[in-house]
Image (cartoon, rainbow, N blue to C red):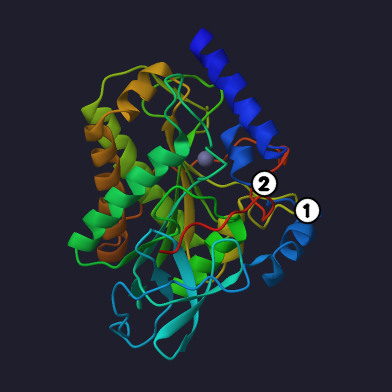
Amino acid sequence: MRAKLIILIAATLAVLAAGFAVDHNRDDHVETAVDGVVADRGQIDAAAPTSMAPASTTAAAAAATIGPSPDGKSSILVTPTGAVTIVLAKEGSRYRVRTPCGGEAHLSSGKVYGATTVVIDPGHGGFDPGASSAEGLTEAALNLDVAKQAKAILDAMGYTTVLTRESDYYVPIQIRAEIALAAAPKLVISIHHNGGEAATHQGPGTEVYHQVQSSTAKRFAGLLWEEITNMFAKTYQVTWWGASDAGAIYRPDKDGKTDFFGVLRRTYPTIPSVLMEAGYMTNPQEATLMARPDYRQNEAQAVANAVRRYLTTADAGSGFKVPNNRGFDIGSGGGGFEGCTEPKFS
Ligand SMILES: [Zn+2]
């Protein structure tokens, strides 16, 4: 408890020092959907001017030569430092890209992706750590580790996987969605781990949210929920936490039709997208598991298995529930462009 208090104080001081009105203790669902409110949407979209960009952030030297992507259509460039950018144009030997904070840069080294099967979106990062365990594991770090391992497994299966970030930096929700739309995959998976309080639950309290109006996203949500919960339940014996409606569910915005979560709303109807809350970082027993390499590896394998089943079978998935009303509270900040700092590109 004391350690938790110290962490909270430290986090609060860090937030105050950085000048961000971000409440890191609020419910994770709220946190991931902060740009999901109609009243704020215009403001957030308007806050993405290219004038925020550095005048020209040009990689000094070409560490590697960028070749054309296999299909000749480049979409995403990932720098050697793990910054994920959107290719706008090829200009001579360089690429003009849209950066994580919505600016432009000219880059001459990195990996360029063409045709993409899956985009995996590791939630949070940078000044936004997301949820955290009592021991100080952040959701941002856990999401990234699981996403990287899932990418490695999917790549080994022969699929091409793009992450929305490959290191620890902040990415506005709009840019996450733009990366997904530029990569044009068959699926988008946003990986999160829950915070807040929940009751004990029979079996893992995994929640997989699909786009409200997408039957394809719904099928994938059912497959992902099935793979994740089966793997957790058969591998680990702990007291799980979960909401009464944990399952393959959805979260509508106030209109009842569009999605509350920004990544899901912004990619609909072009790409089937889901957002997973795999488990509770605030449950000490689950947090102990989350610190273990085997848990993360198993979670990543379950994500990859669900993708393969979605792409290669007609399986329907399971765990579909009618969700409780989680409200429309966006919390006090995050998700938009405010506070965004460009990562290093070289
Ligand atoms: Zn989250």
Mark closest to the chain's N terminus, 1 or 2: 2
Q: Is residue 322 visible?
A: yes
* Residue 270 at x, y percent in the picture: 53, 72
Q: Quadrant of residue 294?
A: top left
Vertical comparison of 140 with 69: above or below: above
User: In the picture provided, is 40 more to the left or to the right than 296?
Assistant: right
In the picture, the disc for residue 40 is 1
User: In the picture provided, is 261 more to the left or to the right than 209?
Assistant: right
- Disc 1 residue crowd, few under 14, some 14–19, many 20+, Cα 10 Å: some
Q: Is residue 23 visible?
A: no
User: In the picture provided, is 5 more to the left or to the right than 108?
Assistant: right
In the picture, the disc for residue 34 is 2
Towards the viewer: 76 or 116: 76
User: Tag 2's secondary structure?
Assistant: loop
* Residue 311 at x, y percent in the picture: 30, 65
Towards the viewer: 149 or 238: 149
Q: Residue furthest bottom?
A: 92
Q: Amino acid at mark 1?
A: Asp
